[in-house]
Amino acid sequence: MTMDTMSAWLDGDMDGFEGPEKRLEIDFETPATSGEGLRVLPKQFWVDTVALLRGSILDELKTEHFDAYLISESSLFVYPYRVIMITCGTTTLLNTLPQVILAGKQCKLRIDWVQYSRKNFIFPSKQIQPHTSFDEEVRVLKKQFPEGSPYVLGPLDSDHWFVFMADYIDRAVTQEKDQFLNIYMHDLDEEISDIFLYGDGPLPSAEEVTQRSGIDKLVPGSTVQAHVFDPCGYSINGILGESYFTIHVTPESHCSYASFETNLPLTSYDQLINSVLAVFRPRRAQTIILWDEGSRLGPAKPKPVLIPGLVLKNTTVNECEPGYKIEVVNYRTAKELMSPRAQLTPQNGSPKNATQLFSAASAESPDSGARVPAA
């Protein structure tokens, strides 16, 4: 964002699309005899749920493990005992809370864990109730989950991350193995943004955009479903075994933004982070890793990855519940490397190595839709 566009934005003279997503995850206790759980609910139930946040379902992918929906404002993932909703723009995600709670009741499931999160908005004044402030969001969440706690991680005068968590897990008898990665990227390289700006001509195919951008090489072996929006923008859901990844791109120059999220059970996210940043070449990025000590990341996760062409500005680590940790890292373009951002390249990121990496993750993937009882 240039100084002129920044000034116009601060003065309220510029509109833009709110790329940074709101995210809601609700996990339910796995019964002694597991089954289809939430997946027995008809598609219309989820159509009605997405309508509550002012969105619509565009497409879906179903596997033996979970259902992945592309929606008009990002993604919805339905596991037997887990629901994840990710929405951008001015969606009203928290309006879906009663509906998701109802889903659990209809399936006779008990809520185990709740997390609502988002980074700070680009255009906060454009949001509508109940998302006009984090205080308001917490008020709504506390009505349903009074035991939950809010946190803010990262510098308040820069990129930071809000999260609310309510934990009902009996950790004395349950070994948690969850982990996931978020990457939020601002001020994308102009050449990359142009791939997602389609002009007045016919729209390119989603497959063409996926290949031109290099997104197709990020998670080899995955099954993907992508969508291009008229006149700009892009979303993709990918499935590999019991794990998902999702990417959403807002390419307009004054608010360019892309996000990447996955719950792939890798022993390290370093290579994947480098590969994603090499595709989008942002001037500003934030990585968020959440993990249980029983996950493949282990109890002693290594230090944050160093990114060629970006400077690590700050790191915030918090242990919200015993054994459940969050790491938030902010990166910015180094002043001496403002021009040659193309130097961002994946580390050890050849297609062969990437394929081996994700094949191993798929083969050893824990059940991402269920809690695992301790032995």
Image: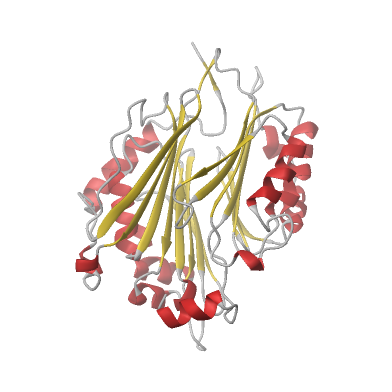
Residue 280 spot, x, y in % from top left: 35, 65
- Which of 267/42 is in front? 267
The reply to whether residue 17 is visible in this rendering is yes
Looking at the image, residue 225 sits to the left or right of residue 266; the answer is right
Q: Which residue is drawn at 36% across and 68% down?
A: 213
Residue 200 spot, x, y in % from top left: 52, 89
Q: In which quarter of the image is residue 39?
A: top right
Residue 87 spot, x, y in % from top left: 61, 56
Q: Which residue is drawn at 55% across and 61% down?
A: 121
Q: Which residue is drawn at 19% across and 67% down?
A: 336
Residue at the extreme bottom: 200
Report the colour scheme: secondary structure
Residue 126 spot, x, y in % from top left: 65, 68
Note whether 41 is above or below 322 in the view shown: below
Which quadrant: the N terminus?
A: bottom left
The reply to whether residue 197 is visible in this rendering is no
Q: In which quarter of the image is residue 258?
A: bottom left
